[in-house]
Image (cartoon, rainbow, N blue to C red):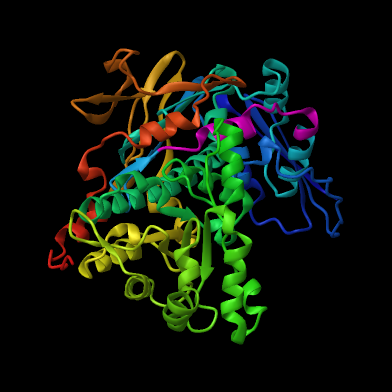
Amino acid sequence: MGSTMISSNRRHGRTNSNAAIRGMSPGFLAQFSCSSRNVSITVFASHERRETSMPTISGFENLILNTDTYKHCHHTLYPQGTEYVSSYVESRGGIFPATMFVGLQAYIQERLLRPITLADIDEAEAVTRAQGMPFCRENWMGILNDHGGFLPVEIEAVPEGTVLPTRNVLVQVINTDPKYHWVTSFFETALLRAVWYPTTIGTVSWMCKQIIKEAFARTSDNPDLLRFQLHDYGARGVSSQESAALGGLAHLVNFNQSDTVPGILAAMKYYNAVCPANSGPNSEHAGFTAWGRDQEVDALRNMMNTYRDAGVVLLLTDSYDHENAVKNILGKELKAEIENFPGVVCARPDSGDPVQVTADTAEWLMDAFGYEVNSKGFKVLPRYLRVVQGDGITLDTLSEIYMELERRGMAAENAIFGMGGGLLQHFNRDTLNFGQKCNAVRVNGEWRDVAKQPTGASFKVSKAGRLALVKRDGEYRTVRRDSVSPEENLLQPVYRNGKLLKKWDFSELIERSEAEVREEYYYPVIEQMRAQDSAAVPA
């Protein structure tokens, strides 16, 4: 067996440790050690394949492993004498001109208020080395001993629930101990994920709200119904329970309708939400088809009788023939029972073209039960009857449905919507081009502006210098931190060295999200509605 020693010292330049082992066969076992000033690698060559035992994995709570593997080799890449590293998070544009910021508080409480332990360090070292990556144990032992295991960083952020244009700073992070300047970027993976997903879903939901608000302004007399118009059906169509929680709570900032239990729990746990969501007796095809096709009317009647005192029932109408169910079962066989139901009966189609099916269903119900005409000249179903469409709803189909209802002379409130994958799952980090980038460093006592300026993607050009967010003349602007007073800076410290500095209440998020904003923030999602020919014929 032969051995090779490779060492490097910052004062004499660095050796790329990955390059030193590049091309090694699986028969090589690399062992790494490091300190804050030097890196050494011992490589033992073996011609025999060895079985190595892996540690027992504790789960997904280890903060040191909640990152990309390659982050473990980055602490050596900063200039000699680096003391502080500042980075920030922003949406660099994307499909919407604005974002609704939400979700950071949940991440801080769930992940950053628990200190790392010696067991975490041992586990992370074994896992990281097994992947062929260096692990600097000294760094993490330092954080354990110097800071009780808490990340020595300060995080400041926009108040959650704020709606502001893209390309503005949302979060800014800096280390609080110069010995651990590298930690600012180390937890980027988890921090960025904790911000981009709930903020993107919250923004999608907020944009849906602007579509609904526009539709109600055009055809309805009841704008007070706005928060009841979009129900979260996304729990089964989202990638994980954690995603359901974060996306679900983000939606609840805009609407108080949801069946996504993790989102309800998250709003209550992380934001002290009180009764953040409503729901009501809904149906599924299993319970209806179990009666058999010939007894479909009995299945629907059974639900109405069972939940008569609940105030609302949602009856699936497409188990077999949706048109027949609406026109003949609801409109004839159950008509008297629906008219005398002490609440609201909702016909819920769950297949077909959502635009045409929603409008057709409303018209068929009006044919059977009649309608009123509101002050704007649009038809409205009786108060005890509505359509619920929960299939195929996206931002696009939502606005198209409202346009079709208006075209046929029907008010927006005739239909209520449920949104599943189109709310919680159809989006990714690139939807709003989220990124976290270094914007300043202090080296040997001197601050340096830092920015990324790639020639191949202009939207990836980052901001230089420590940042602040201000609002002047009703417009949000990202400016240099040293150009404004602390009082004018809207970024607020929310975490420092293991302490939660600010806990927003859910009611505060709702209030901010409903503040008046410039129309340009949401105009693209209502533009088609504004441009449509106003030839919808009122009754």
Is residue 499 or residue 185 the one in the foreground?
499
Seen in the image, is 51 located left or right of residue 515?
Answer: right
User: x and y percent of residue 463 in the render?
Assistant: 33, 33
- Residue that appears at 21% across and 44% down: 520
What segment carries the magenta color? 101-120
Depth check: give the residue in front, 277 or 528: 277
In the rendered image, residue 481, in percent from the top left (x then y), is placed at: 33, 20
Q: Is residue 131 magenta?
A: no
Image x and y of residue 251, in percent: 46, 46
Q: Report the magenta stretch's main SS.
A: helix
Residue under the image location 79 percent in, 28 percent down: 118
Residue 105 among magenta residues: yes
* Image quadrant occupied by the C terminus: bottom left
Residue 351 to residue 181: above or below:
below
Q: Is residue 126 visible?
A: yes
Residue at image coords 36%, 75%: 368
Task: Give the image location of residue 1, x and y in percent.
Answer: 86, 50
Residue 211 left/right relative to 308: left
